[in-house]
Image (cartoon, rainbow, N blue to C red):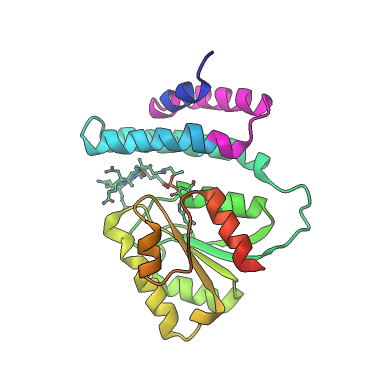
Amino acid sequence: MKDVYAELRNAVQAGEEEKVKELITQTLDGGTPPVEIIEKGLRPAMEEVGKKFETLEIFLPEMIMAADTMAAGVELLQPHMSVDDTSKNLGTVVIGTVQGDVHRIGKDIVRIMLEGSGFKVFDMGHDVPDEAFIQKIKEVKPRVLGLSTLMTTTMQNIPRVIEGIKAENIRKDVRIIVGGAPVLPEWADAVGADGYGKTAVDAVNITKKFSR
Ligand code: B12
């Protein structure tokens, strides 16, 4: 049997957008849930890209090309990830990638999945200054704040945001969940986050738990 996920991983890495769209459409038509396509096809492709970048097998232009191709795939999947009942509102979430970090694909997937599950999400984007998170919390009073980071060099900005929230005396009003490739559950705990999610599915599950 043909391994569609292997084909998808190769096509993402080669920047073959049309092929990626074709494979995704085929897989969706076969009844596969969109999140499985992300977790088994798209995300592993980017992990391979990251490893090749680290070992100098590829360089920034190839990494950008693969990222754009993955983003096109996620865009195609987005309409398939929504709840049937759009009137459902499970609560408000603010999410963003911390300051200094432009990685947004994973955060975007978390946002799409949360929206698709019935949350109202304010996406602050990427490279978000600490103060902007704090202002948004005061403004929209979310039940949950999601912080994403993909680099060891920007990880420390997560505890910095948490400290900023404490300093404003609003820490008790919001549950903070964190994620992104370098983040581990023990670290999340140590820096005072309320929850950690390895994947976007985890992100939805913990957000649901905290919204009750
Ligand atoms: C794509 C990519 C890029 C793209 C980003 C495109 C974009 N707009 O997002 C581009 C090419 C722009 C890029 C740039 C850079 N990158 Co880059 N990039 C990657 C790569 C290959 C994949 C990331 C990705 O999109 N993965 C796919 C998504 C779906 O997975 P994910 O992000 O992990 O998200 C999932 C989970 O983590 C979780 N999650 C994510 N966020 C959250 C949040 C919450 C609250 C929760 C609960 C869960 C959660 O759910 C998501 C879905 O399941 C990684 C390698 C890797 N292994 O991650 C390197 C990587 C992160 N990049 C790296 C580097 C070094 C850079 C650059 C500095 C390179 C350079 N010299 O310029 C710049 C960064 C500049 C900056 N200031 O930010 C390094 C970081 C090393 C480190 N210090 O830690 C990595 C690890 C590559 C490597 N092995 O060297 N990059």
Closest to the observer, 101 or 209: 209
* The image quarter in which residue 115 lies: bottom right
Q: Quadrant of residue 9 in the image?
A: top left
* Above or below: residue 170 compared with residue 155: below
Farthest top residue in view: 1
Asked if the stretch drawn in magenta spans residue 33, the answer is: yes
Expressed as whole percent of the image width and height from the top left, the position of residue 73 reads 53, 34
Q: Is residue 121 visible?
A: no
Q: Is residue 129 left or right of residue 28?
A: left
Q: Which residues are magenta?
A: 11-37
Residue 134 position, x and y percent, is 47, 76
Residue drawn at point x = 41 percent, y = 53 percent = 180
- The tally of labels here is 0
Can you say which quadrant of the picture contains the N terminus? top right
Residue furthest out toward the front? 186
Image vertical order of residue 72 relative to residue 143, above or below: above
Q: Residue 18: within the magenta?
A: yes
Q: Is residue 40 visible?
A: yes
Q: Residue 45, located in which quarter of the rendered image?
A: top left
Query: Residue at image x 52%, y 37%?
Result: 38
Asked whether, in this view, residue 55 is left or right of residue 169, the answer is left
Q: Nearer the viewer, residue 89 or 18?
A: 89
Q: What residue is rendered at 26% in x and 58% in y?
A: 153
Percent coordinates x, y for residue 156 in the rendering: 31, 65
State the quadrant of the C terminus.
Answer: bottom right
